[in-house]
Amino acid sequence: MKNTWGATRGCASGIARIVSAVVRILCQAAKKTWRAVRGYKSGNVLIVFVVVQILCIGAWLVFGDRFPYGSPANIQTALKSIPPMAILATGVGLLMIAGEFDLSVGSNYALTAFILARAFNSGIPAPVAALMGLGLGAFIGLVNAFVTLKAKIPSFIATLGAMMFWRGIILVLSGSQPEAYRPGGACEAMFCASIGPIQAQFLWAIGVAVAAHLILERHKLGNHMFAVGGNRESAVAIGVSPNAVKLICFVIAGLLAAFAGLMASLRVHSVSPDQGAGLELRAIAACVIGGLSLAGGEGSILGDIPRRRAALHDPGRAAAAARAGALSGLVRGHPDCSRCCFQQADEEREGLADERIGPAHRTTRDHKTLRRGDGAGFRRFPD
């Protein structure tokens, strides 16, 4: 009997120790996760979002049909309404990283959808009408880029005027009346089909987001966007053309706005003249909540992990950028610029630099001194 009691106590003690170890590990993991989430720029927003979702799911489990938050119909509705906004915000986010804004995306969203619907109803095949709408969206982005970059008007003001102009065009063309759009066939199946609760439009939104993420993280254009948005002078010093990068971003934003309008019109089979009103501010808010900076040069597409990846922030790229700046200085006839950049590259390569080159330690050329032609024009300035 004593042996049985001792074995039982030993077994219970062992189980208690195992449970205690598991709880301790879970608590440590929870603390690390909490600190990691709080370390994100939008960590607090993410925490509030998760808490609200838990409360809503709990209310659905308790109240059932009186609060159908997790019902299949509600999930399908959410998956249908999210993609257009997500695609629109993706284009706006790329442009914000490059340091510009586009407040005309809401009007673009409506005008391009109206034009493709009117073209289809006039007898033009649905694929051709869709291409016309997408082309118009890219053209609107090109016009915004021209006004901003060539006329030197701030993008906030230029695209604010464009928003009103294109909205007026919609009202004139439509006579304030909606336009039906029912293409049917393969065109509608491509964007409106579903796999269980997952809508095709949701898969399109994921594809667009992944493509934008790959551009930012795996392509030189993404590096150029961060460089131009983070510090224009540094980007110019390493041979990046800010106007070319921003023009591409404006066109992408316009194209994605048109694509979002196409998807929304296919979902509701109609285009309203006031469709998309206020979407531009919601898109900007979504980007800022997701970790993008209003000042440009910071952010990401997938998730809200803030990052700065301008060409001069990474030590490996910093050396290459410095050497590029040196070659640029030689070509432009500024030997003092070349000496400074080569010295900086040597420091980075040999590990002698005190810290990574960041926004508070970027070297640029004082333009006044550059015009004088002497060699004392290097200064350090905050981002």
Image (cartoon, rainbow, N blue to C red):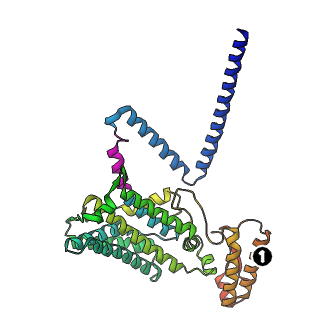
Of residues 3 and 124, which is closer to you in this image? Answer: 3
| Residue visible at 47% across and 78% down in the picture | 247
Q: Which residue is mark 1?
A: 346
Q: Is residue 353 left or right of residue 241?
A: right
- Coordinates of residue 29 in the picture (x, y in percent): 63, 41
Secondary structure category for the residue under label 1: helix
Magenta range is: 68-82
- Coordinates of residue 27 in the picture (x, y in percent): 63, 37
Residue density around tag 1, few if under 14, some if 14–19, many if 20 or more, within 10 Å: some
Q: Is residue 298 left or right of residue 138?
A: right
- Coordinates of residue 363 in the picture (x, y in percent): 69, 75
- Coordinates of residue 187 in the picture (x, y in percent): 29, 66
On screen, residue 322 above or below 20:
below
Magenta stretch: dominant secondary structure: helix
Of residues 86 and 187, which is closer to you in this image? Answer: 187
Q: Is residue 234 visible?
A: yes
Amino acid type at circle 1 is Asp
